[in-house]
Amino acid sequence: MGKNELVQQTIRENVSAFEGWIDRNASRIERLATQYGCTREQARDVTEEVFRSCYLDLHNQRDEELNPLTLFQKAVEKLDRMAREESLDTSFLSFEEDRQLHEKIIRLPRDLKLSFILAIFHEMDDKDIAFLLEISLETVKEAIDQAFLQLTEESDRLRLTKQLEFLNMSYGRMRPIFRKARIFEAEEPEIEEIIKKKTSKKRMIPWLVGLLILFALIVSSILTSEDYQKKAAEKYLERFKESLEDEMSTRYAKLGLPLSTEEDTQNTYLEFYGREAQMEFQNLTRRLEKELQDTGTINRKNAKEQYAAISETLAFPSEMLEKLVKNPLANDREQSERFIKEYMERYYDFQHAYQLLLSEYPTETEQAMVNGKMDLEQSTYPEKLQKAVKGMRAQNIYPTVIPQWNTIVPIFQKNEISEQMRASLHEDLGGYVTLLESTPFVNYPNLAYSYDESVEYLLDMEKSLLASWEDENFHYMLEYSYKELLYTLIGGYEPNLIYGQDGTVKEEVRAAWRKIASNGGSSPSAIILQKIIREMEANGWTESESRRRVTMYHISHAILLAREGQLKKFELTGIISIGQDTDIVSLPDEQFEQLVEDTYERFSAEHDREILSDVHPIVIFLMFIMANNHEDIETMEQLFGTLYGSLTFEEYINGWKQVHIDLSQFDHVQFSKSEDDSGSIWLETDRSTSAGAMMIKNQDHIWLVQHFYYDAPIFE
């Protein structure tokens, strides 16, 4: 092979690899630009320019250079150079909570924002982030921690983590709008010539193959049995390759959703549906091609069985439920958990798709609602909308007015179908069916249902909460709904709602509380209500200190203790653990605050650090604040820790101005451990003032304040 031929072959191979590279990575770059704060159109342009830059240099590229880090490097350079539009466009996010968090992230400083986005949404390690942003590893870690601190003004760290998971899911549902053809619009004559040669050769290949086959048929006077079998297998494979596409078209038609094409990416309502099946189908067809090449035939029975397994992954929620009813899992909790997880994943994907479509017809949708339900019998409504509603009803999903959300949402219907689902699953999983068919449970600040119904739903969800798996999105949704409902039942959002005109707790509320309290010693809600009822009875049903103290954090703590079989240790005061290495103290707490003051007095007398052994970082942090309030710089210094490369205390205290911090103005103090020897801590309040710090553990295993943050800074 000559030198020119070798060069052309290399270029052709690189172009082919490059196209695959685009397919795998373009949506990631477009999401990065959007997360950074670009409009969808700007993000599209950034993506096209990044890949276009790579394409124009393709003849100089080596295979090892085709890696995502190269793309991110070019993307960061492009984002640094471009000017973003002042007005934020968050319309591509369906949920208000996602939009608010997205706007907060956009407003972070450049290094904090990029470090945070790359770590959280792109799962990039600190070393790669440092390389991309040209900053140190320590700076990356501090930037991520600082980003968390700045984003937790209105929500705690644990809730923020969950909100980020949901936001990441919303980012993942964004339809990519980059135009692949624009990437290949080369301006350099050399590249155009290469592409022309490549295209011309591609067009010649099918013609030459066809000519050779025709020639072979003319020359061969007799077809052998092997020839016939091979040709039949080739035709079978040709038809087989269209199987999945045909099935997807049929399925989308049943759903009443348009199937997107390469030319029409705007109609991607179900971005992830079928993606796994497509990958598996491609692998299957490659295996069949190799089988045909090696043996001259195809095992059709085996091919059908493998395709059936792939087709199974495309099952609708209705098909999954039909199979469940035929083969109940009432006596198999493990398989019931597996079913509910897979079902809810598919259901929420479909629900989101239908929500997107309904949002295209706000006026028509509102006009079609009759008594909270949609009536589309009139032919005047758009055909696309009518098909979608028919499709969603087949999945037991109905457009419904949700007054507390002030919107129309496609939701799972409580009916015979949901009853069959409940009866076919293990009883411990009933709470998930309740979550599907009855959400939302709260119409702030009221209950969405009667007290009797609300108690029934609460106990049903509690049973599943304590019995099923953890660390799943749906488990978090169940836990949050449970906590929200229990908190509302005890008057957490609006205490006046539980009292009658005589100033005592209403009888219907008392009855609901007693029913919860009788649920048993292993019930988190029962242990909380038992405390409240005892105090209410002692005070003529007028007041309860425990009721006033209970927060959502205490409910989380009770759930954690119940799972560990330690519910007898439940208290409403002091440091409580709410899981995921997070501890909280609700304020005011006289007993705990006295502990902090006593420890401060003992330590400030002689600064003996042995006193600080095994002292919780929350206590250390509040001692530091107390030293600030007393203008006790010496004690502040003894409670201050320094990491390599960070400011010394002398540098940190330079220009110090004392600002009194009143703990009575805060609702709680929270500590989240990030490593065994480090973590973040902060004070929070609904009145939007906050203080926080980075905490480190020194070589003597004593927690110290490493960096302090306050809205009205202590150190200026």
Image (cartoon, grey):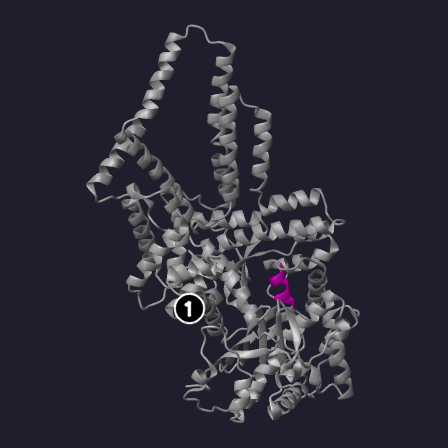
Relative placement, left or right, of 489 versus 392 is right
Outermost top residue: 221
Residue 478 among magenta residues: yes
Give the secondary structure at mark 1. helix
Number of marks present in the image shown: 1
Q: Which residues are magenta?
A: 475-482
Would you say the magenta stretch is mainly helix, strand or loop? helix
Q: Residue at x 36, y 14 (%)?
A: 214
Q: Can the viewer see residue 488? A: no
Q: Is residue 277 magenta?
A: no
Q: Is 284 drawn above or below residue 464 in the view shown?
A: above
In this view, the residue in front, 494 or 650, is 650
Locate residue 17: give its quadrant: top left
- The amino acid beneath tag 1 is Leu
Quarter of the image where the N terminus is located: top left
Q: Residue 59: x, y in percent?
A: 29, 41
Frontmost residue, 115 versus 285: 115
Q: Residue at x 32, y 22 (%)?
A: 207
- Read off the residue under disc 1: 112
Q: Quadrant of the C terminus?
A: bottom left
In percent of width and height, residue 635 lies at 55, 89
Does residue 467 lie above or below 327 as drawn?
A: below
Query: Residue, x 66% and y 88% (percent of image)?
Result: 590
Q: Within the image, what quadrant is residue 91 found in?
A: bottom left
Q: Position of residue 122 (x, y in %)?
A: 46, 57
Do we see residue 451 in this rendering? yes
